[in-house]
Image (cartoon, rainbow, N blue to C red):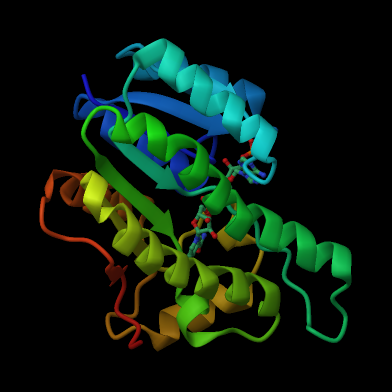
Amino acid sequence: MPVALVTGASRGLGRQIAITLSAHGFSIVLNYMSSEKEADDLVKKLGNGSIAVRADVGDMKQVGKMAEKIDRTFGRLDAIINNAGIAKDNLLLKQNEQEWDIIMRTNLRGCFNVIRSASPVMIQTGGGHIINISSYSGVKGKAGQAAYSASKAALLGLTISAALELSEYNIKVNALLPGYLITEMGMTAQKAAEKAKEESILNTLSQPQEAADFILFLLKTKNITGQVFSLDSRII
Ligand code: NAP
């Protein structure tokens, strides 16, 4: 049975990705940081031998232990969905160093930590897919989201570099801009949600299920790597 690591899968988009991949035959490594009850409840529903693993993606030691646990439990890893992320919106002139650092540590270094620690497990069974969840803000920027936008833009550089380096191990690396989602993160900025809708050709926001279905499709492909996919109708 193929194994997928989904970071930040206790809530929101990550949760929907975990449910969708599990329904299509993946064992899920459901990573979370604080929402233990949500993670435990979900993993019971998923079946397929899925496990929940608490790890702060920004902490290399914790991520390293998670990778060891994946290796011990399954001995393989077919997909990594780097989904864990935080926003903490603030104006640039009001943002302090601590806020900047925690956003970069989670959204950017978190992805590096996971790729660095978990790719060797993937390599030993012949490769797989890594999908990094970036954001429209990473391409277009957004007032009040300098740190978040910077972290998500940097993820695109990381995605392409990783695609180049890891192709020799048959690992495909792509990035998604999932659109504006009404998750806990999306709900914290009502005005931004309205603006996203106005900017959309179809005048709609996005659905976690559509992103999860796209990920499922991408995991079945063999010839796509180093790409960035935008999943809504805003012009980039
Ligand atoms: P969310 O509802 O706030 O959920 C965030 C998830 O990330 C939670 O499961 C949380 O786990 C986890 N997390 C946060 N910090 C973590 C850490 N240090 N280590 C491990 N897990 C951590 O957010 P979402 O809307 O689903 O967003 C998911 C991803 O999509 C993020 O990368 C976000 O930037 C991106 N995105 C979202 C939108 C949107 O409109 N919502 C748009 C574009 C991109 P705990 O609860 O256990 O802490």
On the rendered structure, is 158 left or right of 56? left
- Residue at screen point 33% across, 88% down: 235
- Residue at screen point 70% across, 41% down: 59
Q: Is residue 230 visible in the rendered structure shown here?
A: no
Residue closest to the eye, 179 or 189: 179
Q: Is residue 79 above or below residue 66?
A: below
Please tell me in which quadrant of the rendered image residue 44 appears: top left
Q: Is residue 214 above or below residue 124?
A: below
Please tell me in which quadrant of the rendered image residue 156 appears: bottom left
- Residue at screen point 66% across, 31% down: 62
* Residue 76 percent across, percent down from the top left: 31, 23
Residue closest to the eye, 19 or 191: 19
Q: Which quarter of the rendering shows the C terminus?
A: bottom left
Q: Which quarter of the rendering shows the N terminus?
A: top left
Q: Is residue 25 visible in the rendered structure shown here?
A: yes
- Residue at screen point 54% across, 41% down: 8
Q: Is residue 47 above or below residue 138?
A: above
* Residue 14 percent across, percent down from the top left: 45, 43
On the rendered structure, is 196 left or right of 207? right
On the rendered structure, is 201 left or right of 199? left
* Count of numbered circles on the image: 0
* Residue 9 percent across, percent down from the top left: 49, 37
* Residue 195 percent across, percent down from the top left: 51, 83
Please tell me in which quadrant of the rendered image residue 33 appears: top right
Residue closest to the eye, 67 or 102: 67
